[in-house]
Amino acid sequence: MPFKPVVLWTDALIFLLVAAVCALAWQMRRREHLREPWRKVARSPMGMVSAVVLAVFVAIGLLDSLHFRPRLPGSEANFAVDTLSVLDVMLAHLRTRPETTYSAPLATRLYARETVELPDGRQARIFPRLKHGGAHLTDPEAEWAVDVARRTIVGLALAALAWNLLTGVAVTWRAARLGQSWHACWNAIWRGETEMPWRAMLIAAGFILLVAAPMLVLSAKYHVLGTDKVGQDVLYLSLKSIRTGLVIGTLTTLVMLPLALLLGIMAGYFRGWIDDVIQYLYTTLNSIPSVLLIAATILVMQVYLETHPGLFETVQQRQDLRLLFLCLVLGVTSWTGLCRLLRGETLKLREMEYIQAARAFGVPHWRIITRHILPNVMHIVLIAVVMDFSGLVLAEAVLSYVGVGVDPTTISFGTMINAARLEMAREPMVWWSLASAFVFMLLLVLSANLFADAVRDAFDPRVVVRGGLPALSRPRRRPAVAT
């Protein structure tokens, strides 16, 4: 094989999570009471627009989770030391074109003056040409604007072509599924008369293509978002940071979910001394400053990694283990909130008549918990998990900023912000690294929050009840009484 597959710990857990989600979706196809809340999510325009944006981020994260080591040229048994991903191969034109130092977005010259030797032997301090950004231009000052405009127009044309192709496929699929004509289906989508907000989804996809396609065309010859201190392309760093944010948000959930489910349901169902012990446990854990606990644990882990370098074949394996350990620490320190919610809900459920009847007939506790308690608290679990995702992404950025997050060599939003701390204080100021990390993280967290709102509205029973109350509980006007 021309490459050697590499499965990191986080890669295995990510694809295990994807398989679990697919299996859960397959099971829900046969159960109407589980499908109905997701139909409500699918009918929400804001929820589906945010789902489109999240799908783009998830696709980038999955492409960055397929790792391998390429074979060395001229060798049959030796492979390269560096581990690459499929996303690295797709972005090879960004990864393999470093500059010497800072350059502004779409620039053709370095951002700082350097002393260079002129053809006549004299020395002068000028802004040197970049090695790769705009290197195809003979006279950058005269040709830059025309070249950028031309490539932008080509990118917009490609975006329009891709959007038309995507829309055609979506309309054709829907027309074939419903047995309608293509034009009738298109008119229904364009007028917003479909049950699923296809019009909003296609508009969101169009905006994404209008931004992504010109950036893709321009990135072939320019550094669209500039370069950092060591000349790395900022667009490449921003795209690579997406996987780190997704790993923190999803794998931390996998760690905290079993603890919260098990302890929360046990405390609410069994009560007594079990409830007291679990309450003391999460109250004590909440009293410990979580940042200090995470910092101490991560520093101990860092010392272990540095004193045992022989355990890892590549640098990526060491980075991945520290990232996984950060997920474990965040999961252990963040399960208490969901545990409290589940304890309260279980306390209410255990007093219901059907559960009291099951206990009176001698049904085992584990059967009552798995058949009656667990399915009735899953809506709380789902709402809490989706809403905690954005908080965990922001937590990684804050922890990496203070130096106790991921490995300093790992590309993430936190390390980008930490590196931009000194760049903002220099003169002239370098703003594009911080701005890029801010925009990408804002889009990821905002889309996750909006999708979480749609999931909460669909799964929260109180929202459903409140929606039906006005027509039923409207006070009737009393007839006037003659006095």
Image (cartoon, helix red, strand yellow):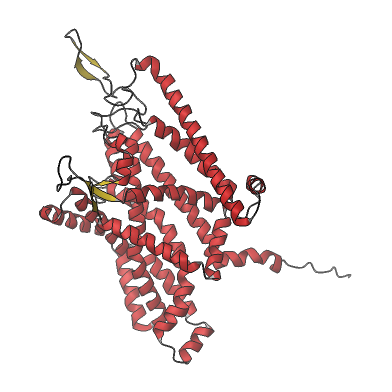
- 268 to 457, vertically: above or below: below
Residue 98: image location, x then y, percent: 25, 32
| Count of marks overlaid on the render | 0
Left/right of residue 221 with respect to residue 456 in the rendered view: left
Residue 13, picture quadrant = bottom left
Percent across and percent down for residue 144 are 39, 20
Residue drawn where x is 44% and y is 50% of the image:
55
Q: Residue furthest right?
A: 482
Residue 361 or residue 134, whichever sits in front: 134
The residue closer to the viewer here, 15 or 458, is 15
| Residue 455 left/right relative to 306 | right
Residue 469 in the image: above or below residue 453:
below
Query: Toward which corner of the image does residue 334 lie, by quadrant?
Result: bottom left
Determine the residue located farthest toward the bottom in the rendered image: 361
Asked if residue 124 is positioned above or below residue 37 in the image, the reply reads above
In the image, residue 171 above or below residue 226: below
Q: Position of residue 314 (x, y in %)?
A: 17, 49
Task: Please name whichever residue, 111 or 283, is drawn nearer the observer in this view of the structure.
Answer: 111
Rendered residue at 39%/54% (across/down): 391
Give the residue at x 29% y 59%: 12
Q: Is residue 335 visible?
A: no
Q: Answer yes or no: is residue 62 visible.
A: yes
How far from the left and from the top, in percent, is residue 325? 24, 58
Screen quadrant of the C terminus: bottom right
Q: Name the residue located 34 percent from the left edge and 78 percent from the top edge.
A: 276
Corner quadrant of residue 82: top left
